Amino acid sequence: MFSNVCVIGLGYIGLPTAAALATNGIDVIGVDVNPVTVDLINAGRVPFVEPDLAVAVSGAVAMGRLRATGTPEPADAFIIAVPTPLQEDHTADLSYVRAAAASVAEVLKAGDLVILESTSPPGTTVELSRWLGKYRPDLTFPHGTADAPDVRVAHCPERVLPGRTMIEIVTNDRVVGGVGEGCAERARALYQVFAKGECLLTDATTAEMAKLSENAFRDVNIAFANELATVCDQLGIDVGDVIDLANRHPRVDILRPGPGVGGHCIAVDPWFIVSAAPRQARLVRLAREVNDERPDYVLGEIVRTAERFKDPVIACLGLAFKANIDDLRESPALHIATRLAERQVGRLLVAEPHIGELPESLARTDTVELVDVTKAVRDADIVVLLVDHEAFRGVKRTALRGKAVFDTRGLWH
Ligand code: SAJ
């Protein structure tokens, strides 16, 4: 039914999707504006680390099923997986989606399918259909018509967890939202090429909102845990004890407090709900604010403790935005370590087993050193656990004795 597919945007979602299609017998043209990414993929290599991705890509390229290029080529289906970054005013920057629409429009023909995978504010996929209609007045599109359109348009949001992408891309259920007649059904047929999870059909705007709601749900629940942590600090009791005990109730499952919410998804997507319905989305906005304030609250606590020491040595354990990955994007741990360095609070010993050198924001200060966890803990007056990497679990309680300890993740609880 689909012999070739064009995937626009070869990032964390587009490239795994391209590889999944290619390894299931589809000829895939991968499109990216970055020539370095295009060259790397054509050489059978990957531009970022994700378990099992490199093997899938090199195999697909070697079999001649996957080829990367700079502009879209004619295909039966187009999957758009480009960034939708957050702007200063907390709205989504849709310029990459629009640019992708313009480039896809040039090669569209009757019978084609266009899918938006990028996480998008409600209404974006219908807007995409309108944009395509403007670029190609010779074809019919599904917005505003009850008839079968020449080109079908759908939203199928990605839901994979970084670090488990190649597994979850196959096993997760997919929400497939069509813009009009037959769109969701056609998109489902494409995902069924590689997805073993169920494909749940709906309309495009509901699909957009479902995706945003998943991440907002998590954000609100993390904010609740973070707020409990601040309340317990105020009361002088251990939030870990409170949560463990409360979670023994059969219908309570409180998440873990941390130094803030990082990454490119959970800290971003709820804002798309807020900007779509600012007066109604009060809880979602407040959760964002609670989580955004969290790193500076933790920083303040560390600074206050450091003031008790003369020339303190501070161990920062972890820089990644979450456990067991090397991704430092929008990381609250990196934010806290960088502010400590900038404010010259003390000498910093950073332990981050997933990186080989300090990121630029820390490397520019000569009071910061990347060391292993044993040395960091041994030489520190203050030990700050910022990421719950497995590698830190084994730190001996005796090694912490006599030191000020901030376990922001409850790993040693
Ligand atoms: N965090 C806490 N406490 C917790 C859980 C998480 O502080 O109890 C923090 C993490 O440390 C991290 C942040 O929240 O800084 C986000 O981590 P995460 O593991 O919750 O989620 P992401 O951002 O890696 O991936 C999410 C996933 N969404 C959901 O679980 C609902 C993933 O399935 C999505 O595909 C992804 O966002 C996305 O791309 O939207």
Image (cartoon, grey):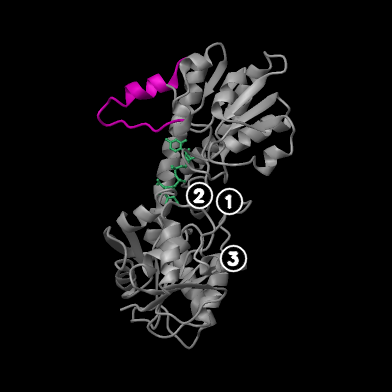
Q: Which residues are magenta?
A: 237-257
Q: Are marks 1 and 2 in contact (CB under 8 Å)?
A: yes
SS for callout 3: helix
Between discs 2 and 3, the one toward the N terminus: 3
Q: Nearer the viewer, mark 1 or mark 3?
A: 3
- The residue singled out by tag 3 in the image is 95
Q: Residues within 10 Å of mark 1 (few under 14, many from 20)?
A: some
What's the residue at 57%, 56% (across, down)?
Answer: 85
Q: CA distance from mark 1 to mark 2?
A: 8 Å
Q: Amino acid at mark 3?
A: Ser
Whether the residues at callouts 2 and 3 have beta carbons within 8 Å, the answer is: no
* Mark positioned earlier in the residue sequence (1 or 2): 1
**Furthest residue in direction left, as rendered:** 250
| Disc 1: which residue | 90
Q: Residues within 10 Å of mark 3 (few under 14, many from 20)?
A: few
Disc 2 residue type?
Val
Image quadrant where residue 347 sits: top right
Exactly how many numbered labels are in the figure?
A: 3
Q: Give the x, y percent position of residue 252.
A: 31, 30
Q: Earlier along the polypeptide chain: callout 1 or callout 3?
A: 1
Q: Is residue 9 above or below residue 343?
A: below
Q: Secondary structure at mark 1?
A: loop
Which of the 4 image quarters holds residue 240?
A: top left
* The N terminus sits in image quarter: bottom left
Q: Is residue 107 left or right of residue 205?
A: right
As measured in the structure, the alpha-carbon distance from the residue carrying label 2 to the one carrying label 3 is: 20 Å
Image location of residue 379, percent across then percent down:
62, 20
Q: For the residues carrying marks 2 and 3, which lies nearer the camera in this image?
A: 3
Q: CA distance from mark 1 to mark 3?
A: 15 Å
Which amino acid, by three-letter code, is at mark 1?
A: His
Residue at 40 percent across and 43 percent down: it is 217
Check disc 2 and report its element: helix, strand or loop: helix
